[in-house]
Image (cartoon, helix red, strand yellow):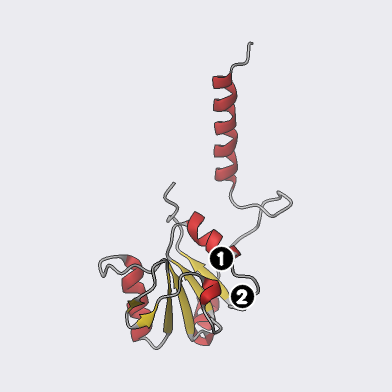
Amino acid sequence: MQRTALHDSLQDEANRDRKRQAGPTSTTGSPLAFQNPSSSELKALLQRVKTIAVVGLSTDPDRPSYSVAMYLQQNGYRIVPVRPGGGEILGEKVYATLSDIPFAVDLVDCSAAAPRWASTWTKRSGCACRAIWHAGGRDRR
C-alpha cells in the first residue's frame, strides 16, 4: 500500500484520538490512576479551606462560574477571581494569573476550559494550595 500525506495525517489524527481517550498520563507516559475523592474527603477539604481562587470567573451572572463563586462567598469562603483584564467581580479584586495573587490560597477552582487552566496552573510555581478543583467536561476543543 502506498503511503500518502493524507494517509499519514489520518493516522496521526487517529493516534491523537486514542491518546485523548486513554486519559491523563504522567511525564513518563504511563497512565495516571485517578479516583474522585469520597464525599467525606470532600467535606473534610471544604471544612479546612478558607480562600478559593476561581480561575476563569465570569463577570456574567448567568454563567455557572459566577453563581458558584457567589454561593461560595455567601457560605463564608473568600473568593479570589483570576482572569485577564483586572477589575472587580463580586466585590473582590481580579488577578490576571495565580502568580499575581500576593497571599496564600487554599483551593484553586478552575472554571476555565482545561487547556487554559492547565497553562495558568503551571505558571504558578510553588503554589501551596491544598487542592485543585476542576469541573469535568469543560474542555471546549
* Residue 57 vertical position relative to residue 7 in the rendered view, above or below: below
Question: Residue 141's x, y, as percent?
Answer: 44, 46
Foreground of the two, 31 or 109:
109
Question: Residue 119's x, y, as percent?
Answer: 55, 59
Alpha carbon distance from label 2 to label 1: 9 Å
Element on which disc 2 rests = loop
Q: Which mark is residue 99?
A: none
Question: Residue 96's x, y, as percent?
Answer: 46, 70
Quadrant of the image occupied by residue 86: bottom left
Give the position of the N terminus as an image quadrant. top right
| Residue 85 relative to residue 26: left or right | left
Foreground of the two, 90 or 19:
90
What residue occupies the far left of the structure in this picture? 62
Q: Amino acid at mark 2?
A: Cys
Query: Residue at 50% of width from left, 86% of height from top?
Result: 47
Question: Residue 69's x, y, as percent?
Answer: 37, 76
Query: Residue at 51% of width from left, 84% of height from top?
Result: 49
Q: Residues within 10 Å of mark 1 (few under 14, many from 20)?
A: some
Residue at image mark 1: 121
Q: Amino acid at mark 1?
A: Trp
| Residue 93 relative to residue 120: left or right | left
Element on which disc 1 rests = helix
Residue at image mark 2: 127
Quadrant of the image occupied by residue 19: top right
* Residue 113 vertical position relative to residue 64 in the rendered view, above or below: above
* Residue 60 vertical position relative to residue 40 in the rendered view, above or below: above
Q: Considering only order in the chain, which callout, 1 or 2, is on the residue closer to the N terminus?
A: 1
